[in-house]
Image (cartoon, grey):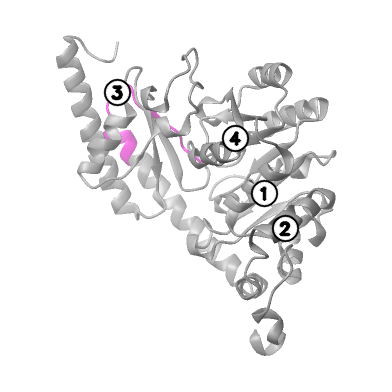
Amino acid sequence: MLERRGPELLGYGEPTGDASLRARLARMTDDAACVAADVLVTNGAQQGIDLVLRTFTRPGDRVAVAIPTYHHFFGLLKAHDLRVVPVRGEGGEIDLDHLRRVLAENDPRLLYVMPTFHNPTGATMNLARREALMDIVRRTRVPVLEDEFELDLRFRGEALPSLRGMDDRDLTVTVRTFSKGLFPGVRLGWVHAAAPVLGPMAALKRFIDLETSPLLQAALADFLESGAGHEYLKRLRVAVGKRHAAAERALRAEMPEGFTWTDPDGGFLRWLQGPPGFDGDRLARAAAEQGVMVTPGRLFYATDSLANAPASSPASITVPGVRLSLSRADEDAVTEGIRVLARCAKDILERAGQASGRPLIL
């Protein structure tokens, strides 16, 4: 690679990214009209999201967010002094009627959604709901930030069109990453949007960090062009599918009555939901004491986003669910981890029943 491209890879690069990589990424989208000019390479999806917020919003603006959502997104909003306007989205399914009201009453500058392998639930928005969502977007002209962080990890079913691929008004900006499909340390992501939108974003990126490593971009471009990336992802999808199958078997066999869970078609994530009144934080703490790490569901909710919940500190919100991540566990570890979770859940239910004098599940 260095022999072929020489000193250009050891100097400063373009803020928009390596031309060969951008051309390859454009071909990877489901938008037949996408060309290299519609792609901006970033240092991971997190920088892509940050650049979108910097481009579309100003301090004090409102951002509509389907809740629950990616918990680190709240930190970015706070850093930019932006206000969360929660849209109901339990189970990863955005409530479109509620979205219409939110858009009409709050005039947000941006809508943030994860239609495919949603974080934290792993759910995927079906085609009819995507079409209905894009109809709302066309009528309201609210810009959309589409986070497709695990798009490459589908192990079952047919791929659905991205919102960007369905957008004929250039209102959607899609952020993707290689950190999930390859490995987190690669820190390479990209933004797919209309070229006039990417211009200001590229200018901002130049001021922030000049550019993403030309050497790393060229190596990734070679990896993808060689076909090795495709073969690696094929193997990874099979492995992820086996982990989810193991999780489904263990959840069905071990979890006590009253628990439900998602069964995703891709990605590393699942959502485990306890009965009403169950505390996901307690389950996460109990499991951690036995070496099993899950993320408390409370972290994926904005301060006042629970239905009928008063404004309060996040610490005071009780959410009955936890997020499971299968990214670092093989099938045996997944099975054993869920057995531990089930034992912890049963113990919490029994203790709650003893304390109240009646069963928690009514």
Instruction: Provide the residue designation for mark 3.
Output: 257
Q: Element at badge 4?
A: loop
Q: Residue at x 36, y 17 (%)?
A: 276
Q: Earlier in the sequence, mark 2 or mark 4?
A: 2
Q: Whole-percent x and y of residue 304?
A: 50, 21
From the viewer's perspective, tell me whether residue 51 is left or right of residue 245. Answer: right
- The C terminus lies in quadrant: top left
Q: Whole-percent x and y of residue 38?
A: 79, 55
What is the crowding at mark 3: few (fewer than 14 residues within 10 Å), some, or many (at least 20)?
few
Q: Earlier in the sequence, mark 1 or mark 3?
A: 1
Q: Earlier in the sequence, mark 1 or mark 4?
A: 1
Q: Is the C-beta separation of discs 4 and 3 under 8 Å?
A: no
Q: Is the C-beta separation of discs 2 and 1 under 8 Å?
A: yes
Query: Label for residue 40?
Result: 2
Question: Quick check: 28 above or below 244?
Answer: below
The Cα–Cα distance between marks 1 and 4, rounded to whole angstroms, is 15 Å
